[in-house]
Image (tube, grey):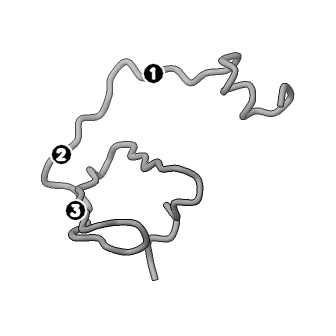
Amino acid sequence: MENSVTGQYLSGRKQIAVPKKRRKPVKSKVIEVQDATENNLKNISVKFPLGVFNCVTGVSGSRKINISK
């Protein structure tokens, strides 16, 4: 892992600088998911702001990638 790019970031040898000026989300520009019940979701509603970085995480095997049919 020492020679991998991912390993260098995980170990702290490489890093991405935090921007001095960050974008502010615009509340009216969102993608909204309402009452999601697929896989292990139980009537979850969420709004993702557009124009900013969004990250959805979960435990391994929780099928985070399978969101469309």
Which residue bears the numbered disc 3?
45
- The reply, left or right, for residue 2 in relation to residue 44 is right
Specify which label sits upstream in the sequence, 2 or 1. 1
Q: Residue at x 81, y 33 (%)?
A: 4
Q: Quadrant of residue 24?
A: top left
Specify which label sits upstream in the sequence, 3 or 2. 2
Label 1 residue SS: loop
Is 6 located above or below residue 52 in the figure? above
Q: Indicate the amino acid at tag 3.
A: Ser
Residue 54: percent from left, percent from top:
38, 46
Which residue bears the numbered disc 2?
26
Between circles 3 and 1, the one closer to the viewer is 3
Q: Indicate the amino acid at tag 1.
A: Val
Q: Quadrant of the N terminus?
A: top right
Which residue bears the numbered disc 1?
18
Q: Residue at x 45, y 21 (%)?
A: 18
Camera-side residue of 64 and 5: 64
Label 3 residue SS: strand
Camera-side residue of 9 and 36: 36
Q: Are marks 2 and 1 in contact (CB under 8 Å)?
A: no
